[in-house]
Amino acid sequence: MRVWVQLLRATRAVENEIRERFRREFDVTLPRFDVMAALDRAEQGLTMTALSRALMVSNGNVTGIVERLVTDGLVARGTQDEDRRAIRVRLTQKGRAAFAEMAGAHEVWINELLTDLTNADAEEMLPRLDRIRRAGRNGGQA
């Protein structure tokens, strides 16, 4: 139980700091950054359903964020040829440029926040964290 509490505290501390830096530096929320990151990985864009799945949230949670990104000219929305009912969203050129700037800053911030971890620490932690992640996905079976 102590390990779980420490993992949770560490994650929340880093996430809160990143959230604050996004707000301060870019006037952006972490969920907005997450949506843009998912779209950046999918050059052809994603359907709203695929985007929701990628972020592990409901369509309703993503819809409002996408609406604001469209209004800001960072995301374009369209239908698919094979299914005109499915809405596909993708980053615009402006969105890709904005995301690239934010992603660069994000990487610097993470490196700053984890600066006390040596490469040896990270190499030791990664397999253990992966086992925890797998166990969480597989009902306790790593």
Image (cartoon, rainbow, N blue to C red):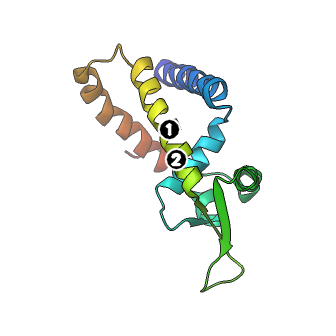
Question: Is the C terminus in the top left, top right, bottom left or bottom right quadrant?
Answer: top left
Residue at 68% across / 66% down in the picture? 77
Splitting the image into 4 quarters, where does residue 21 fall?
A: top right
The amino acid pointed to by label 2 is Ala
Q: Could you tell me residue 33's position as x and y percent? A: 59, 42
Classify mark 1: helix, strand or loop.
helix
Disc 1: which residue: 101
Quadrant position of residue 82? bottom right
Q: Amino acid at mark 1?
A: Glu
User: Callout 2 environment at 10 Å: few (<14), some (14 to 19), or many (20+)?
Assistant: few
Q: Position of residue 19 (x, y in %)?
A: 62, 28
Cβ–Cβ below 8 Å for labels 2 and 1?
yes
| Label 1: how many Cα within 10 Å (few below 14, some 14–19, many 20+) | few
Looking at this rendering, what residue extends furthest in the left direction? 120
C-alpha span from label 2 to label 1: 6 Å
* Residue at the (71%, 56%) spot, across then down: 70
Which residue occupies the foreground of this view, 111 or 58?
111
Residue 41, compared with residue 8, is above or below; it is below
Which label was assigned to residue 137? none
Front residue of 47/106: it is: 106
Image coordinates of residue 71 in percent, x first then y, are 76, 53
Horizontally, residue 35 falls left or right of residue 109, namely right
Mark 2, residue position: 97
State the residue at coordinates (22%, 22%): 120
